[in-house]
Image (cartoon, helix red, strand yellow):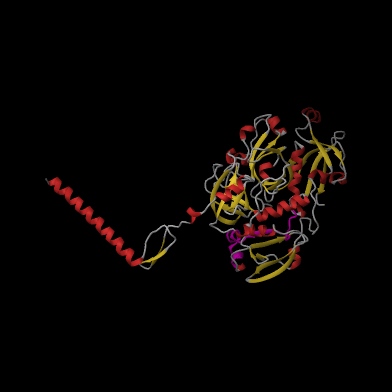
C-alpha cells in the first residue's frame, strides 16, 4: 500500500512539473516571441539577444560546383628513375616525401623507380594543366588520367619552386575546364570545395569553409611538410580551409560554390601525414601570374623591391624589444638591409623603415609583402607606404628582376649557364684515380666554365664545399645558388686534371 501511494506521488509530481513547463513556455512565447526556431530570427529575452539555429549551411547547394569541377580535375602519376645513390646504396626515402605522403615509399626499393601521385586542374580546352611543383618534381615521366579514364602523356612546360606551381600540357581538345575566380575577394566563412584524388581515390569532393586568408610561415615547427620549407624564397600566402585534404589532393582544385577555381590545394598541417583539420591552397590570383609567365617566357618574371634583409615585427618584438618600441607601429615588415642597386633604396626607403602597404593594400607581415609583389612584373611601378618612426610616407618604386634590371628574363638551365656536360665516374674510374666521388667534364660550349678556363676532362670533386658524386647533385647546387641574391651567386669548385693530379680551385660568378 505504501508503495502504491509512493508511485502515485511520483506521477502527480511529474504531471505538475510538465504543466509548469508548458505554461512557462506559453507565457514566454506570448511575451517575447519564439525563443528557438528553424529560421534566422533574433529575439530579445531579458535584455540579451539570442540567435536561432541558422539554416545557411543546410540550404547551401554544392552540387553545381561539384559537377563543374570533377571533370576538370585530373589524376597525375609521376615516375622518376632510381638515382645512382639508390642503385648503389639501397633504399633511400626522403623523410619529407614520406611524411607528406605524395610519394609511395614502398615503390622506392632498390632498382625500382620512384612513383608519386597527385592531382591537377585543366585550365584550357587544348590541354594546359596546373598542378603543384612538388607533385612532378624530379619526374622523368608524367602521366595524366582524366575523370573519363582517358590516359595522356604530359609534357612539363615549366615550374616555379617559389610558389610550388607547375604547368603541364597534354594533347587534347574540347576538354573540360574550370574558370578562374577571384581569390582576393574570398571571405572567411565562405564555403569552398576541395576536389582531387586523395589516397588514389579518384574524383573526390570535400566541403569546408575558408578559415583564414594570407596565411604564411606554415612550415616552421611542424613535421611532414613540403620539401624545402621554410625559405625566404618561398611565397607563402595561403588560403586556409577546413575542407578535408589528404595525400594525393596536392595540385587539385579549391572551388567556390559558383564552380570557379579560387585556389590550388597544396599542403596540410599534420603530425601523421593525413588530414587533421587544416589544409592550405595557393590563391588563384597568384597562380594566374605564374602560369601566364611560364607559358609566355618559360619562367616567372619575378618583381623585387631590392630589400634583402627584413623581419616581421612580431619577431623583432621578441628579439629586440627596445628597437620595436621605438618604431611606433605594430604591423608591417621591418627593413634591415638592401641589395646592391636596390630600387627601393634609390627611391628613398631607409633601413629602419617599416613597410605597411603596397599600392594602399595593407602589409601586415612578410607573407603579405611577397603576395602583393607576386602580382607585378619587373618594370612595374608601385607605391610603397612605410612607417618611419610614427610618420607614414609613400614612395614610388620601380620593381626590378633578380639581375637588377627591368628586362625580360629568359629561362636558361644551369647546364646552359655553365656551358658544359658531365658524366658520373664509374667505380673503376674512381678506383684508378684514387677518389671516392667526383664527376668529369665531358664537353664545353660558351659558358661560365669555359670562361673560367676549365677544359674537358677536369674532375670536379666539390662544389661550395659539398662533395659531388653525380651530375644531378652538381646541377642542384647550381640551381640553389642561382636563387640567391646577386651578391651571393658564387660557385667555388675544387678538382683536378687526371694527368697532373694537382688540386685546383676555381671561383665562378654565376650572374649573367
Looking at the picture, does residue 159 appear above or below residue 139?
A: below
From the viewer's perspective, tell me whether residue 473 is left or right of residue 501: left
Residue 370 visible (yes or no): yes
Q: Quadrant of residue 323?
A: bottom right
Q: Which residue is at the far left?
A: 1
Residue 299 visible (yes or no): no
Q: Which residue is at the far bottom?
A: 391
Residue 305 counted in the magenta span: yes
Q: Which residue is at the far front?
A: 174
Residue stretch rendered in magenta on the structure:
299-325
Q: Nearer the viewer, residue 314 or 176?
A: 176
Q: Which residue is at the far top?
A: 428
From the viewer's perspective, tell me whether residue 485 is left or right of residue 212: right
Q: Nearer the viewer, residue 82 or 195?
A: 195
Residue 311 counted in the magenta span: yes
Q: How many marks?
A: 0
Q: Quadrant of residue 406?
A: bottom right
Looking at the picture, does residue 139 appear above or below residue 218?
A: above
Where residue 60 appears, as percent x and y from the top left, is 51, 54
Where residue 259 appears, as percent x and y from the top left, is 60, 52
Q: Nearer the viewer, residue 240 or 207?
A: 207
Where residue 364 appears, as percent x and y from the top left, is 61, 62
Where residue 91 appears, as percent x and y from the top left, is 65, 32
> Going 59% across and 38% down the picture, which residue do you hit?
200
Looking at the picture, does residue 413 appear above or below residue 310?
A: above
Quarter of the image with the N terminus is: top left
> Going 78% across and 35% down the picture, which residue do you hit?
438
> Going 64% across and 36% down the picture, which residue do you hit?
93
Looking at the picture, does residue 224 appear above or below residue 59?
A: above
From the viewer's perspective, tell me whether residue 247 is left or right of residue 507: left
Amino acid at each position: 500500500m505504501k508503495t502504491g501511494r509512493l508511485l502515485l506521488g511520483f506521477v502527480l509530481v511529474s504531471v505538475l512539473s510538465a504543466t509548469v513547463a508548458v505554461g512557462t513556455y506559453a507565457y514566454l512565447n506570448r511575451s517575447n516571441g519564439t525563443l528557438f526556431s528553424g529560421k534566422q530570427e533574433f529575439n530579445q529575452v531579458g535584455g540579451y539577444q539570442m540567435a536561432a539555429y541558422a539554416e545557411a549551411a543546410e540550404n547551401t547547394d554544392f552540387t553545381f560546383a561539384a559537377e563543374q569541377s570533377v571533370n576538370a580535375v585530373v589524376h597525375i602519376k609521376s615516375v622518376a628513375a632510381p638515382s645512382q645513390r639508390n642503385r648503389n646504396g639501397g633504399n633511400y626515402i626522403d623523410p619529407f616525401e614520406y611524411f607528406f605522403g605524395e610519394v609511395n615509399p614502398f615503390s622506392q626499393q632498390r632498382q625500382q623507380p620512384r612513383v608519386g601521385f597527385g592531382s591537377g586542374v585543366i585550365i584550357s580546352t587544348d590541354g594546359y594543366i596546373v598542378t603543384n611543383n612538388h607533385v612532378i618534381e624530379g619526374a622523368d615521366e608524367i602521366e595524366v588520367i582524366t575523370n573519363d579514364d582517358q590516359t595522356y602523356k604530359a609534357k612539363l612546360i615549366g615550374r616555379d619552386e617559389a610558389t610550388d606551381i607547375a604547368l603541364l600540357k597534354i594533347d587534347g581538345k574540347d576538354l573540360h575546364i574550370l574558370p578562374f575566380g577571384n581569390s582576393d575577394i574570398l571571405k572567411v566563412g565562405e564555403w569552398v570545395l576541395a576536389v582531387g584524388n586523395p589516397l588514389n581515390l579518384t574524383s573526390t569532393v570535400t566541403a569546408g569553409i575558408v578559415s583564414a586568408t594570407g596565411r604564411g610561415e606554415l612550415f616552421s615547427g611542424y613535421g611532414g611538410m613540403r620539401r624545402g620549407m621554410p625559405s625566404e624564397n618561398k611565397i607563402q600566402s595561403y588560403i586556409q580551409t577546413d575542407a578535408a585534404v589528404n595525400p594525393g589532393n596536392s595540385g587539385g582544385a579549391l572551388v567556390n560554390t559558383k564552380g570557379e577555381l579560387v585556389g590550388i590545394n597544396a599542403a596540410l598541417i599534420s603530425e601523421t601525414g593525413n588530414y587533421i583539420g587544416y589544409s592550405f591552397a595557393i590563391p588563384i590570383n597568384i597562380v594566374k601570374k605564374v602560369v601566364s609567365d611560364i607559358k609566355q617566357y618559360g619562367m616567372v618574371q619575378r618583381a623585387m623591391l631590392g630589400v634583402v634583409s627584413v623581419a616581421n615585427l612580431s619577431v623583432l618584438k621578441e628579439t629586440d624589444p627596445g628597437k620595436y618600441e621605438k618604431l611606433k607601429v605594430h604591423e608591417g615588415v621591418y627593413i634591415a638591409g638592401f641589395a646592391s642597386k636596390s630600387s627601393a633604396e634609390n627611391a628613398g626607403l631607409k633601413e629602419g623603415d617599416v613597410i605597411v602597404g603596397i599600392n594602399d593594400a595593407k602589409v601586415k607581415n612578410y607573407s603579405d609583402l611577397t603576395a602583393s609583389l607576386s602580382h607585378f612584373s619587373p618594370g612595374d611601378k608601385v607605391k610603397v607606404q612605410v612607417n618611419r618612426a610614427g610618420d607614414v610616407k609613400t614612395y614610388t618604386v620601380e620593381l626590378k628582376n633578380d639581375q637588377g634590371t627591368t628586362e625580360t628574363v629568359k629561362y636558361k638551365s644551369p647546364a646552359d649557364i655553365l656551358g658544359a656536360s658531365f658524366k658520373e665516374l664509374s667505380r673503376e674510374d674512381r678506383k684508378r684515380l684514387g677518389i671516392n666521388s667526383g664527376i668529369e667534364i665531358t664537353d664545353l660550349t660558351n659558358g661560365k666554365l669555359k670562361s673560367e678556363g676549365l677544359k674537358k676532362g677536369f674532375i670536379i670533386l666539390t662544389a661550395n664545399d659539398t662533395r659531388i658524386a653525380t651530375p644531378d647533385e652538381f646541377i642542384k647546387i647550381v640551381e640553389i645558388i642561382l636563387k640567391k641574391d646577386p651578391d651571393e651567386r658564387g660557385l667555388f669548385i675544387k678538382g683536378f686534371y687526371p694527368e697532373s693530379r694537382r688540386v685546383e680551385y676555381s671561383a665562378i660568378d654565376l650572374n649573367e
